[in-house]
Amino acid sequence: MEKYSSFAAALSDLKRRGYEADFTAETETVCLYYGELDMRMDPQEFHVDECYRFDCDSSYDSNAVLYAISVPVSGIRGTLVDETGILSCHLRLKI
């Protein structure tokens, strides 16, 4: 895995490597949502390829977790940003 100096550098590099979709998490149903295709995926349908944690007390990206995610069936690859760290307990099993 890469080592990034900032959240912005990590996100930029992941986008450059083809992780272009912007995923969001629906915590009530524990699924991943891709708004562009109005697509919901259960945890068994996607894979967390990489995970980066940023703990900087004085910057915008404090306590953020950045996930690089792929969906094997559709070939979609994208990122999920967890600014609070809450999702890590749900997704950690997939890493």
Image (cartoon, rainbow, N blue to C red):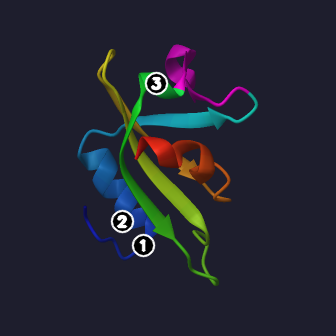
Q: In this rendering, is residue 19 above or below 72?
A: below
The residue labelled by disc 3 is 44
Whether pointer 1 and pointer 2 mark residues with C-beta atoms closer than 8 Å, the reply is yes
Which kind of residue does numbered mark 3 sit on? Gln
Looking at the image, the residue that sits furthest to the front is 93
- Residue holding disc 1: 6
Image point 29% across, 56% down: which residue? 13
Q: Position of residue 69 (x, y in %)?
A: 39, 38
Spatial CA distance of label 1 from label 2 is: 5 Å
Marker count (numbered): 3
Sequence-earlier tag: 3 or 2: 2
The disc placed on residue 9 is 2
Is residue 85 shown left or right of residue 21? right
Kind of residue indicated by mark 2: Ala
Q: Residue at x 23, y 45 (%)?
A: 17
Q: Are marks 3 and 2 in contact (CB under 8 Å)?
A: no
Per the image, is 63 magenta? no
Q: Is residue 64 left or right of residue 5?
A: right
